[in-house]
Amino acid sequence: MAKIPDKQGLFFELDGVLVPEARLGEDGGIRFLDRALEALARVDARQFRLFIATSRPDIAFGEMKERDFTKFCEVLLQRLHAEQIPIAKIYSCPYHPKGKGRFRKESVFRKPGPGIFKMAQQEFDLNLQRSWMIGHTTADVLAAQRAELGTILLRTGKGGTDGEFTVDPHFVEDDLWSAVARVNQFEYSLRV
C-alpha cells in the first residue's frame, strides 16, 4: 500500500502576486507588492513548503532573456533567505506553443497544465489535495484545479480578468497577505 504523504505545499505565482513584474530594478533590487514579504513570513514553514510556480511567456516570446530571469531568481532567493523565508524550489516554464525559437513548443509544465504541481509532488512527496496555489490569472487557478490543489485568486496583477479560462476558485482575496491569512484560517479550522 502506498504511503499517503501529509506534506503540504504552498505555491504562488511571481508576477502580480509577489512582485509587479519579475525584473530587477535599476539598482539591482526587487520591488515587492505591498505586504507580500510579510505575508510569506506568516506561513508556517513546519507545515508548508513554499514554491514559486510560474509560466514565462515573456521568455517564450523574447521579451525577457532567460539569463535575466535566472539572475532575478538568484537575487529573489537571496532576499527571501535574508528575510528567513525558505523557498523549496522555483518551478518555471519558458515554453509556449507560439513562442520563438527553441521556446516554441507545448509543455505540460506551462499553466494551465498541471505539470509543475505533479513534478513538485514527485520531488517533495507532497499531498496536493492538502496544498494551495495562490495566483492572479485564470491559468493559475485552472492548473491548480487540474492538480486538485486549493485555489486562491488574487485581485492584484491581472486579478483573474485575463479572460483566458472560466474558473471558480475556492477563494478570492485582495492580496497575498489576505490569501495567506485565508490559508492559515482554513488550516486552523481543520485542527480544532
Image (spheres, rainbow, N blue to C red):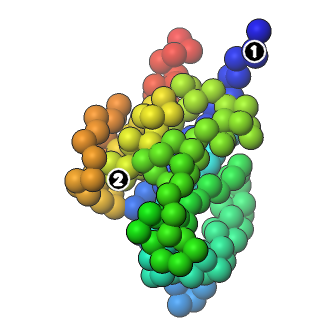
Q: Which residue is mark 2?
A: 137
Is residue 96 among the parts visible in the rendering? yes
Relative placement, left or right, of 88 versus 34 is: right
Q: Seen from this angle, which residue lies furthest top?
A: 1
Of residues 27 and 153, the one drawn nearer to the viewer in this rendering: 153
Secondary structure at numbered mark 2? loop
User: Is disc 1 in contact with disc 2, using a CB cutoff of under 8 Å?
Assistant: no
Relative placement, left or right, of 102 versus 163 is: right
Q: Position of residue 87 (x, y in %)?
A: 68, 52
Q: Position of residue 72 (x, y in %)?
A: 61, 75
Work out whether 81 lies above or below 43: below
Relative placement, left or right, of 4 versus 94 is: right
Q: Position of residue 95 (x, y in %)?
A: 52, 64
Work out whether 192 lies above or below 172: above
Amino acid tagged 2: Thr
Disc assigned to residue 144: none
Q: Report the Cα–Cα distance between label 1 and label 2.
A: 34 Å
Secondary structure at numbered mark 1? loop
User: Where, by quadrant of the figure, is residue 11 drawn?
Assistant: top right
Disc assigned to residue 2: 1
- The 10 Å Cα crowd at callout 1, few under 14, some 14 to 19, many 20 or more, is few
Name the N-terminal-most of marks 1 and 2: 1
Amino acid tagged 1: Ala
Is residue 37 among the parts visible in the rendering? no
Which label sits in the foreground, 1 or 2?
A: 1
Of residues 183 and 161, the one drawn nearer to the viewer in this rendering: 161
Q: Position of residue 73 (x, y in %)?
A: 64, 69
